[in-house]
């Protein structure tokens, strides 16, 4: 495994000139004989950097990220981050799902970097590469320390997740929202349970994720839904889109933002293999639809976006601004009780 050559993460692009993120002598590999972790190997590392700059050419609307894990046991067959595992001489298929890198010193390292005079307090996005609330987080508990550091430095942040484990840290999220801008988005691309079981086998069910949205709203934290991915020919029928948007609206989401499936190298090969096994009649249609590259044609993306926007308006969901930061305002001081006039004194 090429630990020595792993460079500081920058949106999945490594540069030989960068210093190694960690060395081979810093890696401890573990397995746990419990049902939820069976077949998974965890590689514990001590990272040298945890705040990563997003490349300027990226489409992402943020500049800095924190990723305490690499690889993801959610095992979503379409995950765009799969190719990043090849930088470790691991494959982008089964290895991505089962060989999980854990940056065990992420909380202390983040606190140190946030306290540096060079850090200017910019927004930090989490869950943008792999899910920071995947199953490994239940054992390693990195996010409470990460959230505490962000709260203590009043540093704005956002989280995108499919994991219900985020509710474990509800108190920290509420505390953070009282001192800085916090944006939470939950990813729910569809509500079809049969499709979910095969395409996102390691994730909580869609309805459980919408329960997260509902709970956050009850505690004053607005939560948007990233309706992603909309999977061509499998979750894009009008009735399916309507059912998904209706469920999102019922959860109390502040917004819904559709995103059509994109198939970057690494993800494309794994997804197409899955498609050939489960829906072989669609292989040729996908080859034609994605003949131009990783993204579906603009006409298709516009059609899906228009349909979802119309449904969102029908069900009363606000503008599509998923993950917009929300700050909980502290309670106003109560008005002083009115009492009978008293003589003021100097002592």
Image: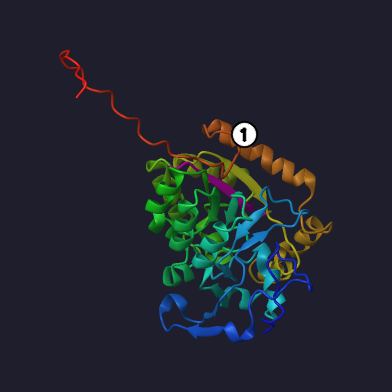
Is residue 187 at least partly visible in the picture?
no
Dot 1 corresponds to which residue?
310
Tell me what residue is drawn at x 55 percent, y 72 percent: 103
Q: Is residue 167 shown in magenta?
A: no
Rendering coords of residue 87 (x, y %): 71, 75
In which quadrant is the N terminus drawn? bottom right
Tell me what residue is drawn at x 45 percent, y 44 percent: 177
Rendering coords of residue 149 (x, y %): 48, 57
Q: Residue furthest right?
A: 292
Q: In the figure, 29 relative to 167: above or below?
A: below
Is residue 106 at least partly visible in the picture?
yes
Q: Is residue 227 shown in magenta?
A: yes
Rendering coords of residue 39 (x, y %): 51, 82
What is the secondary structure assignment of the residue under circle 1?
helix
Mark 1 closeness class: few <14, some 14–19, many ≥20 residues within 10 Å:
some
- Left or right, residue 265 beside residue 347: right
Q: Quadrant of residue 288?
A: bottom right
Q: Nearer the viewer, residue 89 or 203?
A: 89
Tell me what residue is drawn at x 17 percent, y 13 percent: 341
Residues rendered magenta in the picture: 221-231
Q: Quadrant of residue 141?
A: bottom left
């Amino acid at each position: 495994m090429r630990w020595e050559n792993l460079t500081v993460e920058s949106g999945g692009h490594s540069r030989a000139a960068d210093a190694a993120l960690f060395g081979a002598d810093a890696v401890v590999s573990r397995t746990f004989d419990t049902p939820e972790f069976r077949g998974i190997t965890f590689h514990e590392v001590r990272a040298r950097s945890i705040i990563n700059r997003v490349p300027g050419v990226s489409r992402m609307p943020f500049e800095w990220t924190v990723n305490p894990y690499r690889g993801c046991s959610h095992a979503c067959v379409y995950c765009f981050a799969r190719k990043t595992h090849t930088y470790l001489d691991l494959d982008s298929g089964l290895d991505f799902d089962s060989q999980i890198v854990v940056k065990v010193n992420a909380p202390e390292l983040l606190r140190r970097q946030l306290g540096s005079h060079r850090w200017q307090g910019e927004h930090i996005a989490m869950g943008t590469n792999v899910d920071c609330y995947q199953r490994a987080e239940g054992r390693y508990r990195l996010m409470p320390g990460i959230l505490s550091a962000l709260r203590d430095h009043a540093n704005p942040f956002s989280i995108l997740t499919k994991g219900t484990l985020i509710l474990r840290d509800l108190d920290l999220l509420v505390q953070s929202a009282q001192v800085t801008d916090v944006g939470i988005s939950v990813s729910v691309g569809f509500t079809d349970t049969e499709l979910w079981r095969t395409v996102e086998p390691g994730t909580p069910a869609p309805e459980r994720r919408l329960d997260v949205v509902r709970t956050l709203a009850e505690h004053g934290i607005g939560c948007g839904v990233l309706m992603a991915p909309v999977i061509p020919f499998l979750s894009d029928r009008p009735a399916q889109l309507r059912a998904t948007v209706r469920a999102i609206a019922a959860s109390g989401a502040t917004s819904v933002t559709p995103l059509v499936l994109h198939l970057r190298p690494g993800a494309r090969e794994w997804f197409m293999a899955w498609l050939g096994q489960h829906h072989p009649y669609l292989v040729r249609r996908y080859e034609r639809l994605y003949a131009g590259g990783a993204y579906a044609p603009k006409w298709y993306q516009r059609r899906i976006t228009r349909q979802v926007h119309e449904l969102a308006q029908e069900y009363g969901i606000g503008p599509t601004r998923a993950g917009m930061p929300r700050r909980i305002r502290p309670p106003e001081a109560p008005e002083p009780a009115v009492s009978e006039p008293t003589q003021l004194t100097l002592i």
